[in-house]
Image (cartoon, grey):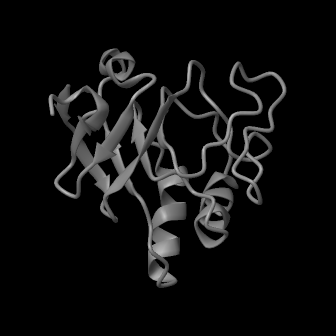
Amino acid sequence: MSAPAEILVPGKAGEGEALVLTAPISFWGGVDPKTGRIADVRHPQHGEVIAGKVLFLPGTIGSSSASAVLMELVHNGRAPAALVLHEPDAILLLGLISAREMGWETPMAVRLERDRFDGFRDSRTVVDTNGSIDLVPNTYDRPA
């Protein structure tokens, strides 16, 4: 599966296991910036780690502090490999922009229709700098 996405914030290409959230999340109080773990006990994916994953966000629950949490995740090396959003969140994305201004390497953020998210569930995924989202082929399934 391949999907062209709209680039929201340029950054480094990201590859990792796809983590497709089933509900919106608040980064402020919902994600531990030191571990990258979903800390909100009410979230369906409580306990999952977003660090190093291609994070598919169906939406965010707003907080003006979300950008600070994302910036701290980048600084701590616990940020997602890439962010794929259905609905752009300017405050959240400000965290990536601020981190980049600090000189830190930041993940890409792209926009993709939510109905395309499930095609990436439980797969290894790459988000390229051109905005394309692709499944990483399983090398074990290739003929010798």
| Residue 43, quarter of picture | top right
Seen at 77% across and 50% down, the residue is: 32
Residue 91 placement (x, y as % from top left) = 54, 53
Quarter of the C terminus within the rendering? top left
- In the rendered image, the residue lying farthest to the front is 144
Picture quarter with the N terminus: top left
Residue farthest toward the right in the current orientation of the protein: 41
- Residue visible at 57% across and 57% down in the picture: 79
Q: Residue 109, position in %: x, y?
A: 38, 51
Q: Can you tell which quarter of the image residue 112 is in?
A: top left
Instruction: Name the residue nearer the viewer: 95 or 135.
Output: 135
Residue 118 is drawn in which quadrant? top left
Residue 20 lies, with reference to residue 29, above or below; the image says above
Q: Residue at x 48, y 26 (%)?
A: 58
Nearest the viewer among 134 and 95 is: 134
The percent position of residue 41, horizontal first and vertical second, equals 84, 27
> How many marks on residues?
0
Q: Nearer the viewer, residue 108 or 24?
A: 108
**In the figure, is residue 10 to the left or right of 29?**
left
Height in image: 111 above or below 1? below
Which of 125/44 is in front?
125
